[in-house]
Image: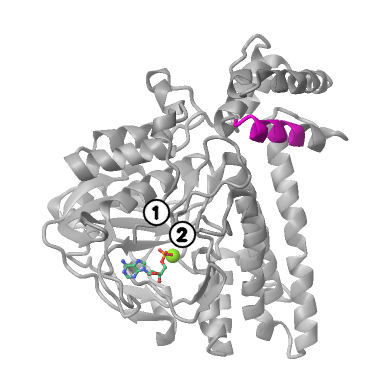
Amino acid sequence: MTVHFPFQNSYSALPDSFFARVAPTPVAAPRLIKLNRPLAVQLGLDPDVLETPEGAEILAGKTVPAGADPIAMAYAGHQFGQFVPQLGDGRAVLLGEVIDKDGIRRDIQLKGSGPTPFSRRGDGRAALGPVLREYIVSEAMFALGIPTTRSLAAVVTGEHVIRETALPGAVLTRVASSHIRVGTFQFFAVRRDTDAIRRLADHVIARHYPELLGAERPYHALLGGVVARQADLVARWLLVGFIHGVMNTDNSSISGETIDYGPCAFMDAYNPAQVFSSIDEMGRYAYANQPRIALWNLTRLAECLLPLFSDDQEKAVADAQDILGAFSETFSDAYQAGLRKKVGLFTERDGDDALIQDLLDAMAKNQADFTLTFRKLGDAAGDPAADDARAQFMDPAAFDEWARRWHERTALEPQSAAERQAAMHAVNPIFIPRNHRIEAVIQAAVNDDNYAPFEELVKVLAKPFDDQPDYAAYADPPLPDQRVLQTFCGT
Ligand code: AMP
Ligand code: MG
């Protein structure tokens, strides 16, 4: 049996300035620790063959499969507001693209596969902990219905990487609808290479926004499309309590997928100012700042596209401002509609936004668990005697007062208690990848070579909306001594 990847590469056919051709660097003793079998099937790959030693060698970058055209992509980016004219894939290699079972073109990338011309001082490698973290969180996001890159496999390399200490090395096989970022456009904009910007924009339209192909002003429409998808994406993040942690422009995907899971985290207690990332000292990427930052990143994208808009600079800027102006409303509409669903409202009435805001304010003041408050509110919708939502509040009376108004409001709608509960449970997960669970999984893997906790967590998170009584403890917030206060990139 040989491993067959049905590659149909398009990015590597773009001009040489878009990437560096570079093969992954072979590793000592690859061992497959996780294969995402359903995703393999979705990509037209044979999971049984990928699980053979030959498959593991490919997923570790030791062997390059037939038809691959490995490249490291060039990009630039604003990191915490500071522009860096050249970043690029410093520890990742794009093997190639396949067309999946739904006809969607998907990148297959090895992350942690060795140095590239973009590595600067980095070793091009990844440690096991961050690889497991990205695997867990990206697949959890997918199960939550949020656009995201996926994880096809994790392998350990049999080598150590040196961070603060020596850690087991690993490679993640990441799947994305593409790895084109805001920073990819910036790479060419800072070099004033307008032809390349046009080539890239045309590639992106054909690949991610084919509905715009015949548009009268395709590049304007492209910016509008990215604005709409990013606004929707950030609304979805907020609705599940997700904090990306490092929303640099190089980590902002043009396709509208969540990409680059580093110090990301889900919050336990609701706190709009929550920050976990150890390097986000100013709280630039705090939970509630994410919409503002997404718009800031989109503004950087708009700047790159100006030369395609018009030769008249003033007109180009005015057009861009117009298009960016849609972000706020698109975001608010998606966010407010999502919140209405979370509290079980089927219709829209004056006063709803205030009702919901009052709940969020009370949650913040009472350190209520974000996920459990909404989930248990669904139980209360089905059975008014269910009081687990109330139990999330330090001062349960704060909930009682709000709940009275909420019951009055829901009584104005014809849906039955059971219907409301079902609708709420369909949007309010019970299981999220809580930081303390991820940490425990990583410790077991790194210290004891024990992957059973990882397997179990991944399994539970694949069905985040289903009550899974055997795994009920996975819904629990951390005990005080289990609380994770900071997360790290681990690069
Ligand atoms: P990230 O923080 O993962 O978004 O990465 C930012 C930049 O640093 C990208 O250009 C990465 O390719 C590069 N980078 C991160 N870790 C490493 C590493 N271990 N070796 C080389 N480059 C790296
Ligand atoms: Mg990145």
- SS for dot 2: loop
User: Residue placed at 63% from the left, 73% from the top?
Assistant: 300
Q: The N terminus lies in which quarter of the figure?
A: bottom left
Predominant SS of the magenta segment: helix
Which of the 4 quarters of the picture holds residue 289?
Answer: bottom right
Ligand 2 located in image quadrant: bottom left
User: Residue placed at 54% from the left, 67% from the top?
Assistant: 80
Residue 42: tell me if it is visible. Answer: no
User: Is 179 drawn above or below residue 304 in the view shown?
Assistant: above
Say which mark, if any, is on residue 488: 1
User: Residue placed at 57% from the left, 46% from the top?
Assistant: 274
- Report x, y in % for residue 423: 64, 27
Residue farthest to the left, as pictured: 28
- Report x, y in % for residue 441: 30, 38
Which of the 4 quarters of the picture holds residue 89?
Answer: bottom left
Which of the 4 quarters of the picture holds residue 301?
Answer: bottom right
The magenta region covers: 356-367
Say which mark, if any, is on residue 366: none
Q: In this view, does 453 lie to the left or right of 467?
A: left
